[in-house]
Every structure is written in C-alpha cells, then in structure tokens.
Image (tube, rainbow, N blue to C red):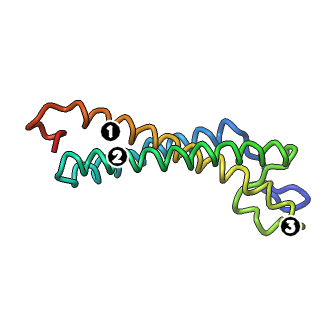
Amino acid sequence: MALDQDGVMLPRLRPTDVARRGVTFGLLGVVPLMVATLSISGHSDRKEFLSVVGAIAGLFGVSLVVVGAGFWWASAGDIRRLRDWRTLTSQAASVTVVGPAFLRSGLFLSILGAAGLGLYQLVDTAPYGSWLHG
C-alpha cells in the first residue's frame, strides 16, 4: 500500500466501499441469527427473540448510520482507515477514523435488524407444527 506524506494509507476510503462492506457483513450476520432462532424451541420465545433483536439492532443501526454519515461529512474528505489511527495528530482528528467505522457498523446492524424483523414475520405466519413454528 502506498502512503502519503502523513503516513496515511492510499487510496482513501470511499463511501460506496464502506457501505458495500457493511452490507456484506450484515448479510453474513443473518446466518448466526438464523441458527440462534432455530435453537429456540418455543414459538412465543422465538418470536420474542426475533422482535427484540430486530428492534434493538435496527435502532442502533440507524443511529450509527446517521452519526457515521455526519462524521464523514464533518471530516471534509480526510477519511482514514482504523489502521491509520496512529497518524492522528489531534483529538478532533479521530472523527476521520470513527466516521467510516460507525457507518460500516450501522449498516451491519441495520441489515441484521431488518432480517430479524423479517424472520419474525415468517415465524409469526408459519403454520402450527412446521419446523419454523417451533
């Protein structure tokens, strides 16, 4: 990797790359959610688990996306990777590292929350006695 005069890795992060990685992590996170859901035996317990996970993950995800996008905007194009933490020269410069991390984490949690609420709907409408009903 190439470095600029401040020791920051080039090329700089782009919003589409950060968003693509966050969505990919979110889609991969649905697999453990499915496994955890199928390990819960009671129907009402399964629905409650999915509703709580979906709501909390969605709420935190949207919050992190908004804060991360605000930090990205505030950093004025000086976006750095987490590996560039050692190149920060002031306390206010941490926004350049935290913005992409919040954006990626927020997208991950938003996808996980949407999947949890979608799975809740599937479990809720599953016919009695099916493997999805529990």
Q: Secondary structure at mark 3?
A: helix
Q: Amino acid at mark 2?
A: Leu
Residue 33: x percent and y percent?
Answer: 35, 49
Q: Residues within 10 Å of mark 2 (few under 14, many from 20)?
A: many
| Mark 1 touches mark 2? (CB < 8 Å) | yes
Contact between labelled residues 2 and 3, with CB atoms less than 8 Å apart: no
Compared to residue 11, the image places residue 92 above or below, namely: below
Is label 2 in a helix, a strand or a loop? Answer: helix
Q: Quadrant of the C terminus?
A: top left
Q: Is residue 49 above or below residue 117?
A: below
Q: Earlier in the sequence, mark 1 or mark 2?
A: 2
Residue matched to label 2: 50
| Residue at point 40%, 49% (across, down) | 52
- Could you tell me how far apart the alpha carbons at marks 3 and 1 are, in whole angstroms? 43 Å
Q: Earlier in the sequence, mark 3 or mark 2?
A: 2
Which of the two discs, 3 and 2, sits closer to the camera? Answer: 2
Q: Classify residue 82 as left or right of residue 46.
A: right
Q: How far apart are labels 1 and 2 at the CA level?
A: 5 Å
Look at label 1 and name its amino acid.
Answer: Tyr
Q: CA distance from mark 3 to mark 2?
A: 39 Å
Q: Which residue is mark 1?
A: 120
Question: What x and y, as percent, mark residue 115?
Answer: 40, 39
Counting other residues with Cα less than 10 Å from the Cα at mark 1, is it few (<14), some (14-19), or many (20 or more)? many
How many numbered marks appear? Answer: 3
Q: Residue at x 70, y 62 (%)?
A: 83
Please name the residue shown 78% across and 48% down the image. 71
**Amino acid type, residue under disc 3 in the picture:** Gln
Identify the residue under disc 3: 91
Q: Which mark is residue 42?
A: none
**Rendered residue at 52%/47% (across/down):** 109
